[in-house]
Image: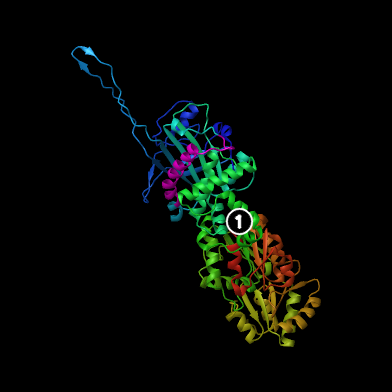
Amino acid sequence: MLLRASPLLRASHRPFSSGVHMALAAHLPVSPNRQSFHSWRSSSHLPPVCQANGYDRISTKITFPQFVRSFYVLSGTYNKVQRPCGRIFCGQREYRKVRRRVPKTKRKELELNVSICIEEKLPDDPELLSIAEMLRLNVPKALKLAFNNLKDSQYKTRDSSINDVGLFESVEMSVLLCNDEFICKLNKEWRDEDHATDVLSMSQHVPELKLPILMLGDIVISVETAARQAEERGHTLLDEIRILLVHGLLHLLGFDHEISEEAEVEMEKEEELLLKSLEWKGKGLIQSAIDAETNSNSVAEVSDDRKKEGSLRFYRPRFSYIFCDMDGTLLNSKSQITPTTVKALKEALSRGVKVVIATGKARPAVISILEKAGLAGKDGAVSEFSPGVFLQGLLVYGRQGKEIYRRNLDQDICREACLYSLEKNVPLIAFGEGRCLTLFDHPLTDALHTIYHEPKAEVMSSVDNLLAAAEIQKLLFLDTAEGVSRVLRPYWSEASGEHASVVQAVPDMLEIVPCGTSKGSGVKLLLDHLGVSSEEVMAIGDGENDIEMLELASLGIAMSNGAEKTKAVANLIGPSNDEDGVAEVIYRYAF
């Protein structure tokens, strides 16, 4: 959390700076009231842009060694006092000059200049703007109180290079609210720690330069990390950011809890004193970290819990893609998608996560189901112009919804299965070219359309007519769960031989598909086509046909209602499809 990198910062580009920082570079004083903003080695002036919310937002592009960012800036001052005019009065008595007397002047109050900045990749959110405005009002107050404490207290471990602030005419400090990505790069650059953190303090004070301005430095706070910690600790985002602000401010004033146990105790007491004096809620950051370590089990349990929907906007998605099965996963036991699940999918889509359907269903069936939920179409999870894996990987659509893979079933297997269906009176559906074909009417084939939303089965007059009507990608036998497990699966596992494979997604259906194909191979093909790595993928499923897909993904999640073999290979087990399992795992793990 501590960043004592002043020498490095003086030799590098700064995240955000005012005109006074240019004075530091030139070792020359400058008026602290200038409102222009510059990069560390640039003198270009960027005019403010008036916004409808009443703030002047100044967008400044700052060049770091590795990346470029822009900031919105709110500038605030505290006790701004005009410079005395310096007039000299003298009097005359007859022709004799008298000694001039300079009237006593009151000591000028210390001027506190604070810039509150918002990194451009954070959402343009009313709560965030409100927090920025609160900081604009709060930070000068915290600064003044902290300076008073320095004057009245004795410290054994604090770096005392900043001691008598009465020697300065003004103080300048910046606070930046950013995301995890931004603070992670800063952490890597200045501390060689490749991870996000909650707060960094970046001192700019150079005692050797006798300037009238105290350039205190910059405090960088990750709003995403702060949002997570606020949830874990049970207080608001504003409370957590205030706690991080106090911690960062104390570092700028010379406190450093990392150098010794005594220094940690001293800084911890100062944190608590400042928070209590300011009447801000929550414990200090050091004490919170100690509590988290002491109660690591309970904290881990809370942090694994579902994130609050209201705070999701401050979380960056962990994955670029979510691959999701339909039956037994996205759909409940009534083959319906619940409003809760719809809301979770829309949340993911709105955050830029691409939801890709990988199912045994045909594409028209999936579009029909999700269309009713408002999830089909250009910005939805499925359309005729979006990628997807259908019919257990036998049909794969890539960019712009164009077919990139198709595999047809062997004609001999199709004929044999059709004859078996007629002889045993077991209903059979042949899937081919977006159509469902069958040999006779049956309540189970009707249910495939009314319940599972597959295209209505067309009854063909003969086996030859069925085989001639379309190229067949897969066959689906319909029976009771017992009939499938005791009769159909054993028979067709042997009868299909080397020409086909059997797949079971739900207990009362048995699918016959071409050998060497699977939903997993379809997903792998699509990932290669899109140029997507497995690290970018979260996959959710329940059936044995989802095993390969879950193994391919960086995070594979099985529903609790899933097959035992599937749950055995999954990274995590989520709630069942009747408990809004997909929604739960999206809220819990996707962000």
Q: How many marks?
A: 1
Q: Residue at x 46, y 35 (%)?
A: 38
- Where residue 429 appears, x then y in whole percent? 67, 79
Going by the image, does 97 lie left or right of 425? left
Question: Could you say which quadrant of the image residue 59 lies in?
Answer: top left
> Magenta includes 152?
yes
> Magenta includes 235?
no
Tell me the residue that label 1 is attached to: 318
- Where residue 96 appears, x then y in whole percent? 22, 12
Q: Secondary structure at mark 1?
A: loop
Q: Nearer the viewer, residue 174 or 444?
A: 174
Color theme of the render: rainbow
* Above or below for 506 versus 95: below
Residue 215 in view (yes/no): yes
Magenta stretch in the rendered image: 131-159
* Above or below for 40 versus 265: above
Residue 182 in view (yes/no): no
Going by the image, does 35 lie left or right of 492? left
Secondary structure mostly taken by the magenta-highlighted segment of the chain: helix
* Above or below for 194 versus 550: above
Going by the image, does 511 lie left or right of 111? right
- Where residue 331 appears, x then y in whole percent? 60, 73
Q: Residue at x 52, y 51 (%)?
A: 223
* Above or below for 177 versus 163: below
Q: Nearer the viewer, residue 349 or 51?
A: 51
Q: Residue at x 58, y 81 (%)?
A: 450
Q: Nearer the viewer, residue 514 or 40?
A: 40
> Hey, what amino acid is under mark 1?
Arg
On the rendered image, what quadrant is the N terminus found in?
Answer: top right
